[in-house]
Amino acid sequence: MFVSEKQIEIRYAETDQMGVVYHANYIIWMEIGRSQLVNDAGFEYAELEKDGYVSPVMDLSISYKAAMHYGQVATVRTWVEKHDRLRTTYGYEILHEDGTIAATAQSVHILAQKDTLRPVSLSKIDPAWDAKYKEIACETK
């Protein structure tokens, strides 16, 4: 299984009054993990944007398991769960330094024209990227 990992040093600004990482920061970490996966697969998301495409989130779910705190290092593990003609589903685990799972998550994205948000197939825009995602996806439809 093709899994990308990215370590993130938790900053004080990412915590709430209880000293716990604020829940919305996990979404930012997921984006960082997704970008790392794209880079590790040999592609650049910025190139898609230059060509007039974006990849909006269509669905997102997170399950929080164990709180994280300032001063810890989080590891974001990211993979492609599914990739079909119009949608890509990414899976995530966010881990404590000892490997304890802090959160699990999933996000579903489409590729769309930036100006109209009309969905387009990755196979038409970048066949090599589409083929790589089909190769590394845990489940292909």
Image (cartoon, rainbow, N blue to C red):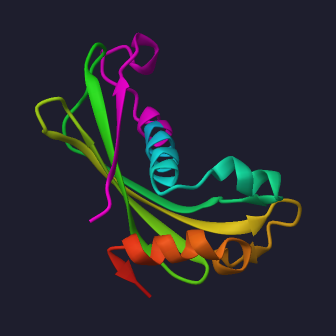
Based on the displayed image, in which of its 4 quarters is residue 68 positioned? Answer: top left
Q: Nearer the viewer, residue 76 or 14?
A: 76
Q: Residue furthest right?
A: 115
Magenta residues (range): 1-28
Task: Measuring from the top left, give residue 20's x and y in whole percent.
Answer: 30, 22
Is residue 135 magenta-colored? Answer: no
Task: Quarter of the image for the N terminus: give it.
Answer: bottom left
Per the image, is 26 magenta? Answer: yes
Q: Is residue 114 left or right of residue 24?
A: right
Is residue 105 placed above or below 132 in the rendered structure?
A: above
Q: Which quadrant is the C terminus positioned in? A: bottom left
Left or right of residue 43, residue 13 in this image: left
Q: Which of 24 and 84 is in front in this view?
A: 84
Q: Which residue is drawn at 72% across and 52% down?
A: 47
Residue 63 percent across, percent down from the top left: 29, 51
Q: Residue at x 67, y 68 (%)?
A: 111
Q: Which residue is drawn at 36% across and 20% down?
A: 10
The answer to whether 94 is drawn above or below residue 132 in the figure is: above
Q: Where is residue 105 in the image (x, y as percent from the top left)?
A: 35, 54
Front residue (pair 67, 33): 33
Establish if 33 lies above or below 130: above
* Residue in view at x 52 percent, y 77 percent: 131
